[in-house]
Amino acid sequence: MMKKEARSSFWPDVQPELLGLVLLRLPSLADRVRLRAVCRPWRSNARLQPLPSPLPWLTLLNGTFLSIPDGKIIRMPAPDDAFCFGSIDSWLFFVHSDGGCSLVNPFSKATLDLPKLSIKWFEAIPRFGSLLQKMVVPLPLESSPGSLVAALILENGGTICMYRPPMATYLPTRRNQRSFDYVSDITFFKGKFYGLGIHDVLMTFELNFGADSKPRISCVKCITKYPTVSVILPKPLYSTYMTKKYLVECCGSLLMVKRHIEFTDTTCEHPLDCDRTAAFEVFEADLSTKPGQWRCLTTLGGQVLFVGKHHSKSFPAGESTGFQEDCIYFMCDYRNDAVDPLHDSGVYNMRTGIITPLLLETAAVPKHHGGQWRPTWLFPADAM
């Protein structure tokens, strides 16, 4: 009897230090949850362990989530009659069929309601789905939800919607100067609102609030020159190159990531099957001079980047995260029609220029069933 009791009490008595070593080797949120569910002592001791953020997920078009790089499919409840069109770290941006918008944290179940999108573009889901491009906020949502100011850029690159509940303001960004004709990406960086214009010009948008408390863009300034091209791509025989651009904050710096995609329109029987990402360029904004300069980078300083039209983020690399340094993770985000986000996806190594598959070789590639959601990166909160 005493031997049986000793054997049954061994696992709960595992020292917290050993439990911490195990947790550090479990970058998947699902695996961490399973470990904590073993017994109460493990759950309480696990709370004492400082851990890096768990592996990110990729939202699939049918409303499920794909864990990277193990390929596990996760299903979580989502608002009824709503579709995901972007994310902000561990929050999902939902648009409802009546034009209402909300930010939902699927882990804490917290919800922030946003004003309805009242312009006619948003009257029907099939029509406006392809127009919504990116939602950004200046601060973590958990820190000051009452003073939320969010920006939503539309696919046409000429309109930005500013939110400050219970109000929304639609702001055309076009000006007389050519640089303002199109905004390909936006972000908040160190409390300021930035946009990327044509010819890779970085712009700042100065915000103020009128007597009606509506957020407004009062001034737009170009603050960088054109960057120097660092990658020379071979000229394809039957196709051309399309370039996607992303703004990403990384270790206190603002980066521009240029993704070069070999793009085939008519020469292939199935054009979509012929598209492929060929290379990346990464530039850092040096704002210490006037005008600022784009400086070409060959390393990410121990970080990895996850880039996408609807959300981009830097992430620390290392053994505890399961990611290699100086790599860029990407998915297929450049088609307005519903496509498989894993079609043109992968991991680009900045040191070698080699692209490897996004999922592990042992992971089962999920079948593509289509849907209304848009592919975006979701970074799970490591809830205890």
Image (cartoon, rainbow, N blue to C red):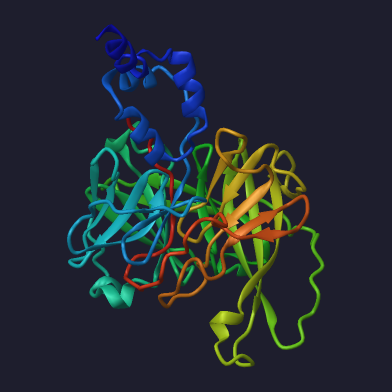
Which residue sits furthest top?
2
Q: Is residue 289 above or below residue 168?
A: above
Q: Classify the position of the C terminus by image quarter.
A: top left
Quadrant housing residue 286: top right
Quadrant housing residue 359: bottom right
Q: From the viewer's perspective, tell me whether residue 92 is left or right of residue 259.
A: left
Number of numbered discs: 0
Q: At which x and y percent is residue 212? A: 26, 48
Camera-nearest residue between 311 and 171: 311
What's the residue at 49%, 74% (across, down)? Answer: 335
Q: From the viewer's perspective, tell me whether residue 301 is left or right of residue 189.
A: right
Residue 115 shows up from this direction: yes
Q: At which x and y percent is residue 310? A: 45, 58
What's the residue at 27%, 61% (across, down)? Answer: 95
Q: At which x and y percent is residue 6? A: 32, 10
Q: Is residue 236 above or below residue 188?
A: below
